[in-house]
Amino acid sequence: MMISRAERSANYVILIVFAAFALFPLGSILAAALGPESASVAREGGGLHWENFATAWTQGQFGRYMTTSVVVSALVVSVALVCSIMAGYAFGTMRFRGEQALFYLFLLGIMVPTEAIIVPLYFDLRTLGLTNTIWGVALPQIAQSIAFGTYWMRAYFKSSNVSIMEAARLDGAGTHRILWQVLVPIGRPALTTLVLLTFMWTWNEFLIPLVMSPSGSVRTAPLGLAFFQGQHVQGTTLLAAAAVLVALPVVIVYLFLQRHFVKGMIEGAVRE
Amino acid sequence: MRSGLAGPTAPPDRRRAAVPLRRRLTPYGFLLPAFCLYAAFLLVPIGRAVQLSLYEWDGLTVGTFVGLDNFATVASDPRLREAFWHALVLIIFYSVLPLLIGLLLAAVLNRGKVRGLPFFRTVIFLPQVVAMVVVAVAWRQIYAPNGSLNSGLRAVGLGSLARPWLGDYTFSLPAVGFVGTWVSMGLVTVLLLAGMSRIPIDLFEAARLDGAGAVREFFAITLPAIRGEITVALTLTIIAALKTFDLVYVTTGGGPGTSTTVPSYEVYRRAFQLGEVGAAAAVGITLTILIFGINLVVNKVGDRSST
């Protein structure tokens, strides 16, 4: 394409400005996290203060919160994945009575905001004795993830190769074997993307863990950070270090697999 | 219903004509686990939310049926009306501004053979994957009275503009909204870029041969081709704007006064701090209806303009 030199440099200026804008808040919190915690620490000198992360970790009880987050994420991702694969398989490859109506019912779950259901969820789960438990935090998120996951897996199974399924059937494979031993292995990219998105949404979720554990006994990492902030109104260093710790798992996965994230969010969005 | 789950012993079925019962039940068997969890923790709560919105209930004692009174409150309570108004203002920051930025960046990325495109895409999308609490903590430090925004202003001689941004009655809502712009712009850019990269390159070359400049090329070719992506970007970001919760909870708590309160924050405050459960449910339902309505309008307009 023919592009003048002036236009080209203008393009780079625009891109650099916005890249800097995107990075600045994250860069500054990382810088704050590695800075000296107090004037006395600053006098001792010594470039980067990695010990801030350890201090924030222990002071803010992030060991406990991270464990909760890992357990909740593992539960939500695994249960929602298996359920979504099975439901998506039914919607994508089988014909049955009520198919349309049921599918729209699942679609509804993608559109209804958490804000609408959080109130009854809290009071009903309290009655069932599930508040302040891992399940109280995980089950509502499993349901939301199933709504998106079913929709996602249906699209994958619809596009999957019919001749492969036919061949497997002629070889005597039943519906279960076709799903788990033929379609799931070749569907790795679609599954990876779904796992990543579900993990990210679960790890970052705020409202559900906030409401479902009023006693704070099953606080996830983002909640821990919010409460840590409440205690550290002044000290920005430890707060910044804690923020970096909470963001890190998703950011690391993102940097390695960013194509999956971007592709997933765009495909999920465009097909809607 | 569970017979479909019976396992790998299902006999090979070559005679499709007479479909045995267990085979007809198979799809329902596959749907069962998903449906049970989904129904119990999403469908039932939706119904219960509608039910709760018709009661006056403090979460402890027996509720009283009040019909649509809670919805009348949503319409008349000044604080709630303000919350919904703020949500609409946030749409400008979450959707309109990022759309303008996204159009500019995607156009630049698409037509200039930019080196380092993957790097740029990764960087600008990064705010999307960081937890909102972390985003809120980062921006609180930037907006703080002696944070980097105010130091920057003082450094360039605009110290008179420095203020505690999140504690200012006039500027706290725009300050919160601007964080939304920062978060959304990457998603919008990447979305629009995906649409633009599907436009056949000869179209641009033909336009260039006809003497069209970058601006005319953009309005004549690029913009009409990505209407679908614009619709999707607006839908997603508008929903995000209307659902703002963690950002407000962590940065301002709705304040100062009521200057940054939003519907989702009011749901939380009324249900779990003030014990006005019915009113909270009504706000949640109203928010849902608003989201559905705006979705419908955006998609209708998007459809019509593309035909």
Image: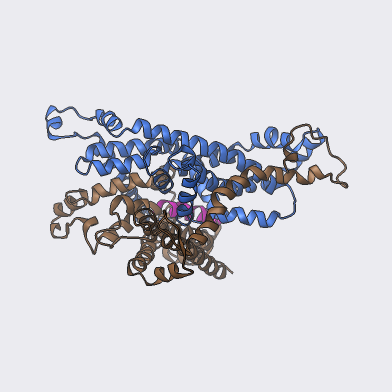
Query: Residue B190: within the magenta?
Result: yes
Q: Image point 52% across, 61% down: which residue?
A: B51
Is residue B79 left or right of A87 when viewed as pictured? left
Main SS of the magenta part reads: helix
Query: Chain drawn blue, letter?
Result: A
Query: Chain drawn brown, letter?
Result: B
| Label total for image | 0
Is residue A241 left or right of A92 when viewed as pictured? left
Q: Which of A238/B146 is in front?
A: A238
Query: Please, which residue is most extreme toward the front here?
Result: B62
Residue B80 occupies which quadrant of the picture? bottom left
* Residue B79 seen by the camera: yes
Q: Which of B62/B163 is in front?
A: B62
Residue A63 occupies which quadrant of the picture? top left
* Residue A259 seen by the camera: no
Which part of the image, by quadrant, shows the C terminus of chain A? bottom right
Residue A10 is situated, as x and y percent measured from the top left of the image, at 34, 55
Residue A23 occupies which quadrant of the picture? top left
Work out whether A232 lies above or below B205: above
Work out whether B88 lies above or below B178: below
Magenta stretch in the rendered image: B185-201
Residue A16 is situated, as x and y percent measured from the top left of the image, at 33, 48
Residue B84 is situated, as x and y percent measured from the top left of the image, at 38, 65
Is residue B117 left or right of B155 when viewed as pictured? right
Is residue A37 left or right of A161 when viewed as pictured? left
